[in-house]
Amino acid sequence: MKRVITYGTFDLLHYGHINLLRRAKALGDYLIVALSTDDFNNLQKHKKCYFSYEERRLLLESIRYVDLVIPEENWEQKRDDMHLYRVDTFVMGDDWTGKFDFLKEEGVEVVYLPRTPEISTTQIKRDLNGK
């Protein structure tokens, strides 16, 4: 079984997120999503989420492409996750290109997928705020 993992906040879930998850799942048999916890978002990423971790987890678990949702609690856990979950492929959006290439040293394929250009959570927030 080929295992794929991706990481993110997935707040204000939209079709760009679904596109990423669909394409990530197509790279393997089992998709793990490491979902940023509320503390990680607030204290390290400096992001304010609309939905709580539990609400975002429930949303992700309802998507047919997602097999398992785990908490992302810090930047450093990625190396350990690759081994703990026996990951074959690490996937992120191409706005992160090169940032996680160090995971290749763990024997993991690293793939950066193109983002869906016309949609982002940041843009949704701007549009809703009229900015």
Image (cartoon, rainbow, N blue to C red):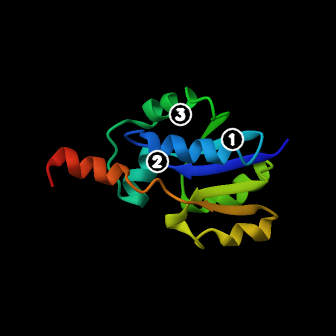
Question: From the viewer's perspective, is the residue at label 2 or at label 1 nearer?
Answer: 1
Quadrant position of residue 109: bottom right
Dot 3: element: helix
Q: CA distance from mark 2 to mark 3?
A: 11 Å
Quadrant assignment for the C terminus = bottom left
Q: CA distance from mark 1 to mark 3?
A: 11 Å
Dot 2: element: loop
Dot 1: element: strand
Q: Position of residue 128 (x, y in %)?
A: 20, 44
**Which residue appears at 36% of the width and 49% of the height?**
121
Q: Position of residue 64 (x, y in %)?
A: 62, 29
Q: Residue reaching furthest right? A: 1
Amino acid residing under circle 3? Leu
**Which residue appears at 46% of the width and 31% of the height?**
54
Q: CA distance from mark 2 to mark 1?
A: 16 Å
Q: Residue reaching furthest left? A: 130
In the picture of the structure, the residue carrying the numbered disc 2 is 9
Does 12 sit left or right of 98 as displayed?
Answer: left
In the picture of the structure, the residue carrying the numbered disc 3 is 60
Nearest the eye: 15 or 96 = 15
Does 10 sit left or right of 69 as displayed?
Answer: left
Does 51 sit left or right of 93 as displayed?
Answer: left
**Which residue appears at 70% of the width and 44% of the height?**
26
